[in-house]
Amino acid sequence: MSLEEQKAIVEKFWDCFNLARSQDAVAMMAEDAEFIVTGTTPLSGTKSGSRAVQEHFDRFGSFLEPGARMDVLNLVGEADTVVCLSRGRMRGRTGLDYNLLYAFVFEFSDGLIQRVTEYLDTSAVETALFGKTIS
């Protein structure tokens, strides 16, 4: 699979997210894929297998108001890895904006997403999604 094809899959992955069709995004992942959220928030950790990834997306979505968006700013790749720099525009069910800059590392194998590692502002997760105060 070419790097351009991999980048197109990453774009389509986020298009599915923006349409609230996470199951279609998960369908682009290998059955044994991993989704890793960095940090120590209640959403952090490694989700292994497509079912666990879907459960993570469903749980994450339960903390958001409808209309969440992830806009791709730049895609950079080499071999079977695509780094996606993006901007999330969301609102937590707390009523607080959850607008972040992200870096996602997508790793591919046999034409499918094998692993995604998400780098984000963990304090924003704690405040906007879980209503915590951070001093």
Image (tube, helix red, strand yellow):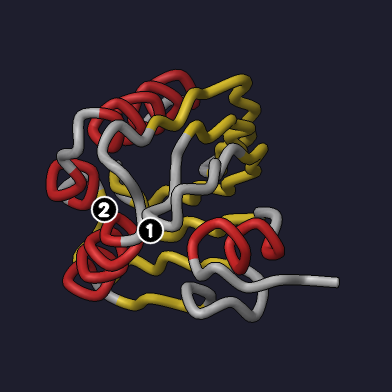
Q: Amino acid at mark 1?
A: Gln
Instruction: Name the residue nearer the viewer: 1 or 57.
Output: 57
Q: Residue at x 59, y 25 (%)?
A: 75
Residue at image x 19%, y 38%?
20
Residue kind at label 2, given as amino acid type? Met
Left/right placement of residue 3 relative to residue 99 reads left
Horizontal and vertical percent position of residue 45? 51, 79
In the rendered view, tell whether residue 50 sits above or below residue 69. below
Q: In what quadrant of the picture does the C terminus appear?
A: bottom right
**Relative to 29, is 9 above or below?**
above
Mark 1 Cα shell of 10 Å, populated few (<14), some (14-19), many (≥20): many
**Percent from the top left, x then y, of residue 54?**
21, 63
Of residues 53 and 105, the one nearer the viewer is 53
Q: Report, in whole angstroms, how far the alpha carbon at label 1 lies from the one at label 2.
A: 6 Å
Q: Quadrant of residue 24?
A: top left
Q: Looking at the image, do the residues carrying marks 1 and 2 touch, with CB atoms under 8 Å apart? A: yes
Instruction: Estimate the x, y position of residue 104 in percent, counting from the top left.
Output: 57, 46
Assign a secondary structure to mark 1: strand
Residue at the image point whose x is 38% and y is 58% from the top: 114
The quarter in which the N terminus is drawn is top left
Q: Residues within 10 Å of mark 2 (few under 14, many from 20)?
A: many
Q: Which mark is residue 29?
A: 2
31 w.r.t. 75: above or below = below
Mark 1 = which residue?
A: 114
Q: Looking at this view, is 94 or 15 the one in front?
A: 94
Question: Is residue 111 positioned above or below 63 on the image?
Answer: above
**Residue at horizontal 45%, vertical 38%?**
90
